[in-house]
Image (cartoon, rainbow, N blue to C red):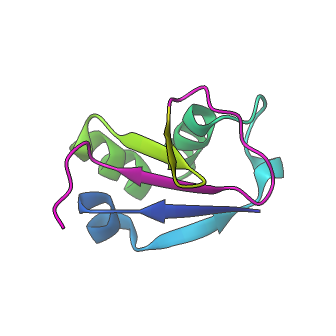
Amino acid sequence: MIEVRYFASLRERLGAGERVDLADVPQPHTVGGLRDWLCASSTAHAEAFDAVGLVRAACNQVMCEDDEPLEDGAEVAFFPPVTGG
């Protein structure tokens, strides 16, 4: 399982987060592949990510690019490039 967390406007649209079975995400397992799978899995995800435009990601609390590999137990956070505190 992967813990997916959403922040800022993504959180407003999708909630705080969800758990995803890594086996459901197409290979290779990457952060970008996870995002694409989420968008394909529901209209709500597709609309939320589309509304934000550029989305940043962190894997295990470290900023990363779309090609970051994922392993079971990872935490992935998605957020707009600028978030308030």
Q: Position of residue 12 (x, y in %)?
A: 27, 69
Say whether residue 57 is left or right of residue 10: right
Say whether residue 66 is left or right of residue 24: left
In the image, what residue occupies the spot 40% across and 46% down?
46
Q: Is residue 77 magenta?
A: yes
Say whether residue 61 is left or right of residue 29: left
Q: Does the magenta stretch include residue 5?
A: no
Q: Position of residue 61 (x, y in %)?
A: 53, 55
Q: Report the residue that reaches farthest toward the front.
A: 62
- Residue in the foreground of this view, choosing between 11 and 39: 11
Is 75 rendered above or below residue 19?
Answer: above
In the image, what residue occupies the spot 43% across and 74% down?
16
Q: Quadrant of the C terminus?
A: bottom left
- Residue in the foreground of this view, choosing between 46 and 68: 68
Q: Position of residue 52 (x, y in %)?
A: 24, 45
Say whether residue 20 is left or right of residue 50: right
**Residues drawn in magenta:** 65-85
In the image, what residue occupies the spot 83% across and 49% down?
23
Is 25 rendered above or below residue 83?
Answer: above
- Residue in the foreground of this view, choosing between 73 and 62: 62
Q: Report the residue that reaches farthest toward the left.
A: 84
Q: Quadrant of the N terminus?
A: bottom right
Secondary structure mostly seen in magenta is loop
